[in-house]
Image (cartoon, helix red, strand yellow):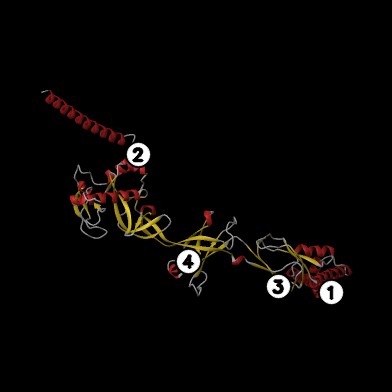
Amino acid sequence: MARIKTFRISRRRALEVLLGVTLGGYLARHLSVTWRNGQGSSSFGARDDDRARAAAPKSATTRKAVWVCPMHPQIVQDHPGHCPICGMPLVQRRAGEIAADPHLVQVDTVSLEHLGVRLASATQSTIARSIQTYGTVALDQDSLVNVTAKVKGWVRKLDVTYVGQSIRPGQVLYEMYSPELYDRQNEYVDLLDRQARTERAYHVASEAKTLAILQDRQARLNPASPAVQTALTVEALVRDRARLHDELLNDGLSERDIARLVATRQARDVIPVVARTAGTATEINVRSGAYVDASTKLFSVARLSPVWIDVALYPDELSWVRNGDRAHVTLANDQGEYAGHVELPDPLADAPTQALTARIVLDNAQGALHPGAYVDVAIRTQPHEALVVPRSAVMRSGTGAIVMLWRGHGQFLPVGVETGIEDENLVEITSGLQLGARVAVNGQFLLDAEASLADSVQRMSAAPSGQQREK
């Protein structure tokens, strides 16, 4: 009797323990859900689950009828119709029945918060094909200036000594000794002296008075008068001096050099030749002491702002590129970015490669773009409106592209999609998604792994019991 009494006490105790565990678990789950839906809920659970409850058909408690596509379960509508992807008639289901899809991945809100899963909507946006290539920084050929010798002579001193040297207006480039230029200076001084002697001999005060005499009507009526004859002589001397003044400028003298010559009446055998424009020396063809002829090329000077980016486009790329397409230029090691537009000025293709050279003109005021350097170029061609999602939302596999579609209530569905063109941030969806569909943009690889694991467990559960026991 004692043994039978002990057995009854143990059984009653076991029932009490089981009842307590069941009640405690129910209270714990109830309190946890209440806490999560209250002030302690995360932004993902509170925002996205509530939005899903509001946007999606009512849950299984209302058993509202919806229509889904048998081939594409991500297509869910609250009215009959046809699938926008495959065109099949939609099949009526109860809202609670949709969750029975074996490919759905169920993740609780806490796990979603820990994974940091973010969602993005499929939207209509402008997208363009992006051609990734490289370019070479080149000089602006429109700014290239050749410095040539104007007269024969010897280069006594060279002040521009290396390629890349900066040149400013008025800077001395080189010093030139030229007997021809020396004689021309003396001729100019002689004209100055002759004009001065003529004006003193006939008491002509200045060139202005000479011109006044020639403009006087009474003086023109008597051309044989000494005053008129003197004025005509001075006028010829002034005309010859102006001609010689221009020749000296063309020979390399500056206005300051000519003013000095007028003031001192002394010709110089060595003349400094100064720069007329600013730039950078890109070529040097002479050294100190060299004898040069007139029109000998001494230097090449070019501006470094703007610069050209030369890009080789091959036949498969040329069919996409048009004049005016936007282009982004990136320096090595991400040291800077520039924006410009593509120009196709040269209609002749390179014979061996069949490539056509495109040009992008960029401002280089900071001097970061050095001629001869390589840069990365992205050309955006044929922009158009399309359904797009972030690039990070699309997973590539051997069978195609997949996105993880958000179905609400912590459920994700792997959906195959067809993609079109893509740019740096977006990818075009040509089939598989509807406007407004929400997809995971991060953590989808973990969700996909969960889906694959669920499929494997399901196949194992469906296998014969004898195969499950095989070792």
As measured in the structure, the alpha-carbon distance from the residue carrying label 4 to the one carrying label 3 is 39 Å
Earlier residue among tags 1 and 2: 2
> Separation of disc 3 and disc 1 at Cα?
45 Å
Sooner in the amino-acid sequence: mark 2 or mark 3: 2
For disc 1, the marked residue is 229
Kindly identify the amino acid type of the residue bearing the numbered disc 3.
Thr
| Image quarter of the N terminus | top left
Mark 4 vs mark 1, CA separation in Å: 67 Å
- Give the percent coordinates (x, y) of residue 428: 36, 58
Instruction: Give the residue at mark 4.
Output: 323
The local crowd at label 1, few if under 14, some if 14 to 19, many if 20 or more residues have their Cα within 10 Å, is: some
Answer with mark 3 or mark 1, whichever residue precedes in sequence.
Answer: 1
Position of residue 5 relative to residue 52, above or below, is: above
Q: Name the residue under label 3.
A: 296
Q: What residue type is labelled 4?
A: Asn
Between label 1 and label 2, give the one nearer the viewer: 2
88 sits left or right of 194 in the view = left
Check disc 2 and report the residue beneath it.
Answer: 42
